[in-house]
Amino acid sequence: MRRPERTTVAATKADGGMERTLAILKPDAVARGICGEIISLIERAEFSITALRLLRLTREQAAQFYAVHAHRPFYGSLCQYMSSGPVVVAVLQADRAIERWRQLMGATDPAKAAAGSIRQRFGLDVERNAVHGSDGLETAQREIGFFFSALDLLAL
């Protein structure tokens, strides 16, 4: 069966005004077998998972996804790392999903992340920090559309 063309995901707002955001469980999380623990934390924080997929990014796909960072010194390393193994991508839905997911993730640097946050608990360093999350509504819309078509998203 032919996969439908990707369509713009409606402004990261689901029916009922609930916000959507993208979560990525990075290659280090998948390799260490901690995805179940992270997903459990997501569910306990009362997010609905409206789409979920295991995949492996090519170097080119990682470069395209992280193109906003192309001018930064860590860009090449980030693309290499994100294409080094499988990742789990998910769409999370909740009231204020972006803000709440970023709080649950914690600071990018695990050493500076709040106690109990995902990155504080599971992050190894700034790059291998277990998870990624969208940083705003426009970013969430673009990032969700990168991995999922509108037909992939459950309406909850």
Image (cartoon, rainbow, N blue to C red):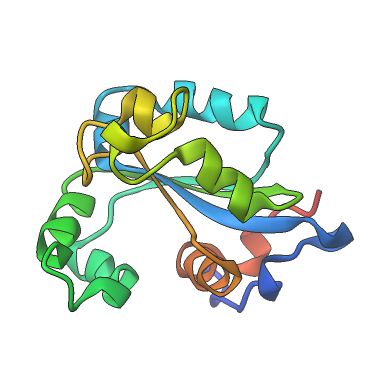
Residue occupying the far right of the picture: 16
- Image-based side of 46 in relation to 6, left or right: right
Identify the residue shown where x is 70% and y is 74%: 10
**Residue 141 falls in image quadrant:** bottom right
Decide: is 7 above or below 3.
Answer: below
Point out residue 71 in the picture as x, y percentages from the top left corner.
Answer: 18, 78
Residue at x 31% of width, y 32% of height: 29
Quarter of the image containing the N terminus?
bottom right
Residue 34, x across and y down, in percent: 37, 23
State which quadrant residue 61 falls in: bottom left
Let me know if residue 64 appears in the view. Answer: yes
Residue occupying image coordinates x 65% and y 67%: 150
Position of 65 relative to 116 (above/below):
below
Q: Nearer the viewer, residue 30 or 45?
A: 45
Q: Quadrant of residue 59?
A: bottom left
Counting from the top left corner in percent of width and height, residue 100 is at 62, 45
Q: How many numbered callouts?
A: 0
